[in-house]
Image: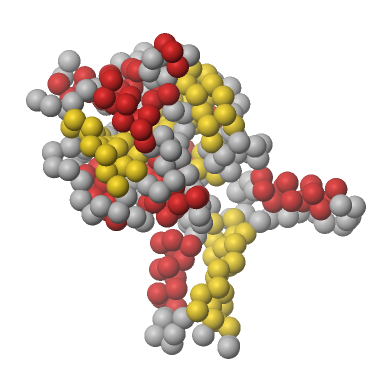
Amino acid sequence: MKVRVYVSLKNGVLDPQGRAIHHAIEGLGFSGVSDVRAGRLFELEVDDSVTDAMLDEMAQKLLANMVIENYRFERVAA
Amino acid sequence: MTFRSAVITFPGSNCDRDMAVAIEQVCGGEVHRVWHGDAALPEGLDFIALPGGFSYGDYLRSGAMAARSPIMRAVVEAAGRGVKVLGVCNGFQVLTEAGLLPGVLMRNAGIRFVCREVALTVGNNTSAFTHRYFKGQKITIPVAHHDGNYFADDATLDRLEGEGQVAFRYAEEVNGSARNIAGVLSEKGNVLGMMPHPERFIEAAHGGIDGRALFESVVKGLVGA
């Protein structure tokens, strides 16, 4: 089974990379984009024994830095 | 009594030799070089230094992988016993990721890598790392980093300031750090993380010697001088 873990910056945390990407999008001539926040996507291949509690622990101990980031995950049917 | 120290080398560390030389020259004693994959530290250490560099290629987040390497369990345990631990630059990032210091080092607010000498103000001159400076002393130390933008929530920042845990502040705009924080002490004061590189300013030939007092503090505190 595949699990997707999304890690994103918490609200209120400045995102200089997102801002630079936003600037670049505007530089390409696209209008109508009011904000960009950069984040990360992890795809984990796991077997059925991996519980949600284990995924929470992996995210909190490693994949996300809980000082500045939030995470959520979803299980994807093969 | 011989001063015993260790410099940890992670894959991608690049200031480990500079750090070892600075400790040898200013503190003297035995400097042990320790590899990240080792499970144990040498016995009876007084001081552990985590050097600058780009451990594990900054994969995931700066310092994140190194903070989970085998030797860090021993470093966390030694810090708990009161051994002095200094993290410079990437070493600071490793200490926050390992939970030995609060907060996090984010990408510089200006996006760019910053590599130059910066003016600092000494915020605390009573710690094991800073008692050879004057409080409020203006010093110059080089920085070289991409992720030096210190961030913590307001309650944490208030606590750090209230408890005298801000060791150094930037006296000029460098990277967007909250409240211009350049170096942070742990609650017990035996762990210091800082983005500027004191080991690069210990001889006149380096362009300055303002880093010396930090290493003098570490060794002089030991013998109570």
Q: Which residue is drawn at the image coordinates 76% and 54% (left, top)? A: A35
Residue for point 50% across, 43% down: B105
B37 relative to B204, above or below: below
Residue B137 place in picture, x, y as percent: 43, 13
| Residue B155 x %, y % | 46, 42
Where residue A15 appears, x then y in whole percent? 65, 48
Q: In the rendered image, which quarter contains the N terminus of chain B? A: top left
Locate the C terminus of chain B by quadrant.
top left
Q: Quadrant of residue A42?
A: bottom right
**Is B30 left or right of A77, judged from the image as shown?**
left
A3 versus B208 height, above or below: below
Q: Nearer the viewer, residue A10 or B91?
A: B91
Left or right placement of residue A45 versus residue B33 in this view: right
Q: Quadrant of residue B129?
A: top left
Would residue B102 be seen by someone viewing this image from the given angle? no
Specify whether B110 is left or right of B66.
Answer: right
Q: Position of residue B191 (x, y in %)?
A: 31, 37
Q: Residue at x 31, y 42 (%)?
A: B8
In-front residue for pair B60/B24? B24
